[in-house]
């Protein structure tokens, strides 16, 4: 039986873990039914690598921003910088950006300033924002909501693993929540409960490769082909077939990342 076409909405193909076998990684993804991938550049000084990958592989698009882990170490990026990058036809989102108080709470002030820059760039370009949030639920909900009231923008909460409060705040704003391999982990019952209640038309799926490989590959290098495991678990939670879940999440991706559709698309 032919596998349903699925999309890995967030991976990091420019990372060193894929330096020696990227061609094989992309081929394995295609063989497993992954029709498109969105690779995320987290350091603007590495943007050239992401552009090269997206230009080499027609099924790959890219996003660019400064990850909250890097705001203190990396040269700051301006709205103008991000808008200029977004002029590339295959850049389809701004980020990832956000707040991470788990590892880098000492740079919270700088993270918030960087987040504001990315939100404004998303507004000016009309591209969706990709948000990373960890141990910062209250601040993140407050910032996203207040900024949205000032001027709307579109957004996905990538690799969602926060609590119900932030999930509901994001959904109230019309945002999407992205399901990663964490959903397959034994200790993720609360997260599964949250996603069971998220409307099907607001869910994306991703790997966050090379990190967070889902069961049954947990502990190994994650790859885009492994998003099939996320798809299967998502379908189980929603009580529908994997093909139906794949079709729904592909449609959601197309709506959020509309720029990809200028190149054609699935679903």
Image: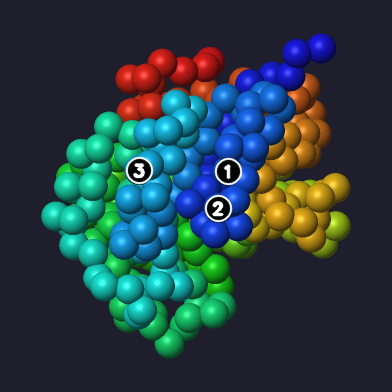
Classify mark 3: residues with Cα within 10 Å, few (<14), some (14-19) or many (20+): many
Residue pictured at 31% horizontal, 62% vertical: 45
Residue pictured at 33% horizontal, 53% vertical: 47
Give the percent coordinates (x, y) of residue 107.
Answer: 39, 83
Residue ID for mark 1: 22
Can residue 71 be seen here? The reply is: yes
Q: CA distance from mark 2 to mark 1?
A: 6 Å
Q: CA distance from mark 3 to mark 1?
A: 14 Å
Residue pictured at 29% horizontal, 44% vertical: 153
Q: Nearer the viewer, mark 3 or mark 1?
A: 1
Residue ID for mark 2: 19
Q: Choose between 46 and 19: the one closer to the eye.
A: 19
Residue ID for mark 3: 51
Q: Return the mark for residue 70.
A: none
- Quarter of the image with the N terminus in it: top right
Write down the quadrant of residue 246 in the picture: top right
Q: Are marks 2 and 1 in contact (CB under 8 Å)?
A: yes
User: Between disc 2 and disc 3, whose residue precedes?
Assistant: 2
């Amino acid at each position: 039986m032919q596998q349903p076409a699925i999309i890995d909405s967030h991976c990091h193909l420019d990372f060193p873990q894929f330096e020696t076998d990227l061609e094989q990684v992309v081929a394995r993804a295609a063989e497993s039914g992954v029709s498109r991938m969105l690779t995320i550049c987290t350091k603007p000084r590495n943007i050239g690598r992401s552009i090269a990958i997206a230009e080499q592989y027609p099924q790959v698009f890219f996003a660019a921003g400064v990850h909250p882990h890097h705001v203190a170490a990396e040269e700051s990026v301006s709205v103008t910088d991000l808008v200029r990058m977004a002029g590339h036809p295959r850049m389809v989102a701004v980020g990832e950006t956000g707040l991470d108080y788990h590892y880098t709470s000492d740079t919270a002030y700088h993270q918030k300033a960087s987040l504001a820059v990315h939100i404004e760039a998303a507004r000016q370009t009309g591209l969706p924002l990709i948000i990373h949030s960890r141990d910062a639920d209250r601040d993140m909900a407050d910032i996203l909501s207040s900024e949205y009231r000032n001027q709307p923008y579109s957004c996905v909460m990538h690799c969602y693993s926060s609590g119900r409060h932030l999930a509901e705040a994001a959904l109230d704003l019309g945002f999407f929540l992205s399901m990663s391999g964490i959903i397959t982990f034994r200790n993720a019952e609360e997260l599964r409960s949250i996603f069971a209640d998220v409307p099907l038309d607001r869910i994306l799926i991703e790997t966050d490769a090379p990190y967070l490989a889902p069961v049954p590959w947990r502990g190994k290098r994650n790859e885009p082909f492994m998003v099939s495991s996320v798809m299967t678990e998502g379908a189980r939670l929603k009580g529908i077939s994997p093909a139906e879940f794949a079709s729904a999440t592909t449609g959601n991706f197309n709506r959020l990342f509309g720029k990809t559709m200028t190149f054609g698309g699935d679903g």
